[in-house]
Image (cartoon, coloured by chain):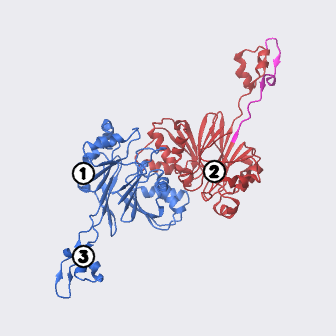
Chain colours: A blue, B red
Amino acid sequence: MKLTILGCYAATPRTITNPTSQLLEIKNRMFLIDCGEGTQVQLRKNKIKFSKINQVFISHLHGDHFYGLIGLISTFSLLGRTTDLHIYGPKGIKEIILLQLRLSNSWTNYGLYFHELESEESETIFEDEKVVVTTIPLKHRVYTNGFLFQEKVGERKLNMDAVLNYEIESCYYQKIKNGKDIALEDGRTIPNSELTFDPIEPKSYAFCSDTVYHEAILPIIDNVDVLYHESTFLESEEGLAQKTLHSTAKEAARIALKANVKQLILGHYSTRYESISLFKEEAATIFSEVALAEDGITFEL
Amino acid sequence: MKLTILGCYAATPRTITNPTSQLLEIKNRMFLIDCGEGTQVQLRKNKIKFSKINQVFISHLHGDHFYGLIGLISTFSLLGRTTDLHIYGPKGIKEIILLQLRLSNSWTNYGLYFHELESEESETIFEDEKVVVTTIPLKHRVYTNGFLFQEKVGERKLNMDAVLNYEIESCYYQKIKNGKDIALEDGRTIPNSELTFDPIEPKSYAFCSDTVYHEAILPIIDNVDVLYHESTFLESEEGLAQKTLHSTAKEAARIALKANVKQLILGHYSTRYESISLFKEEAATIFSEVALAEDGITFEL
């Protein structure tokens, strides 16, 4: 699992920072999460193949999280894309995009599918054979969802020593990987546990931006490997965080601690701060496994 | 008059080039012309004070000319703007912007006025004591206007030698600048022409993007000082220019020649070309006073 931070600052794009967007690579799928203005340029800077993105998840309809979407959709067209594109985001997103396409007398030469969200409960919005994506209802000034990306448990790993020892033919390997016991020709049945190792532990990633400190998300993100939690403000601006329904670095750390996550990544910094190092310092007083998102960096999870 | 090119490439924004946007400074007014994605960052890069922009002119609703507008409007709000902002653009632009503001539960803390255009004839859309702006109906795949910016004739310049010679008191200076003759106490009347010089020749700038070669614009842009005319393609792609209703560099030069303009600036280059120098070479075979727009450069007109 690989996470590339395309932008991790709040509010307005600047020459040196970009609004929210991330690319999550998981089991060879490339999920784009949020799409602030300038995201397509950030994708180019990070040498990410546009054609590999088939799903876009938009947390909420504040500009710093989706103003780059219409441009990306248009660019996909100009680049001759033919593969379907699926957009997951709050109700209204379809109207915004289609209105702009209609008024520019444009259309996509690929299938453009909108999956509009309006539930206040966590729900599964994407699932294939390897990955499940569920929403994390957040509490912000407009309807907002975080997203939980979970790998499914993979197939069991062959214990080759045991398999060769019992002289089992290779045509049975897939069956064994699927967890089946094997009956030998001499009548013995070998239990699967003797022939395999446990599959690789599936990884999970939770994206939570934007939100006030909100313990209701704890059961959904319990034990995730990596949590990205917004920390728009430092403790000195706690009142402002409350007022604007954002979080401080310490509040993000408190959520990470209570949810027992393995690693916390902070981001969505207000552009008022000259340096972001204090975010890590403040969070680390509560939760030690904390890292700072920065535009253009990649986390190998 | 000063023209800053914020972006001058067609289609998609890239790491090294930006879609169309220009800032025209004229008589202390700052007019923003078109606003492709990333324009607000380009404004910052060029150290242009956001608060000085009070009028935005949008030629047409293709993304590379207006996808940056909603972000700019939002940023103006975040920066605490209180001065009115006037948007001039094709019918539909108001619906797009207001829909996005409504769905993000946002509003501007300044007056946001839309002047929607739908006339097929040239019309005056802005006028104050020093500048007039009229539309230049263009021919493109959607409803499109260029814009003609004209300084008004200023007041006459005092001939100080003559004024002092006749011992005219300074309280009469404004009257003289306004063109009035002066009656002296000894009964003589001094004609204004003896007391003043002609005012500085008013300047004009015509912005024409996007359009196919379209001679109908010639009467409107006749004799302008500076013409920016799109040249999306070179002559080798003339067929493509016809098909997409764009112009070649030579066609832009032909328009400049026929309109008897003083200077031609080319822009809106297709991103297919590795270098833009050929645009100048091709145009110069027809019209010699030609310059190339480039992102981030300024023309002192």
Q: Are marks 3 and 2 on the same chain?
A: no
Query: Which image quarter holds the N terminus of chain B?
Result: top right
Chain containing the residue with disc 1 = A
Identify the residue under disc 3: A161
Task: Report, in whole angstroms, how far the alpha carbon at label 2 lies from the one at label 1.
Answer: 52 Å
Q: Is residue B241 magenta?
A: no
Respond whether the residues carrying marks 3 and 1 are from the same subunit. yes
Q: Position of residue A26 (x, y in %)?
A: 36, 62
Decide which of A9, A211 is in the foreground and name it: A9
Tell me the SS state at disc 2. Answer: strand
The image quadrant of residue B225 is top right
Around disc 1, counting alpha carbons within 10 Å, would you say few (fewer than 14), some (14 to 19), or many (20 or more)?
few
Q: Nearer the viewer, mark 3 or mark 1?
A: 3
Q: Where residue A251 appears, x then y in whole percent?
A: 27, 44
Indicate the secondary structure of the residue bearing disc 1: helix
Q: Nearer the viewer, residue A177 or A267?
A: A177
Q: Position of residue A270 (x, y in %)?
A: 39, 41
Give amino acid for label 3: Asp
Question: What range is drawn magenta here?
Answer: B184-204
- Residue underneath mark 2: B145
Q: Which mark is residue A216?
A: 1
Q: Mark 3 or 1 closer to N-term? A: 3
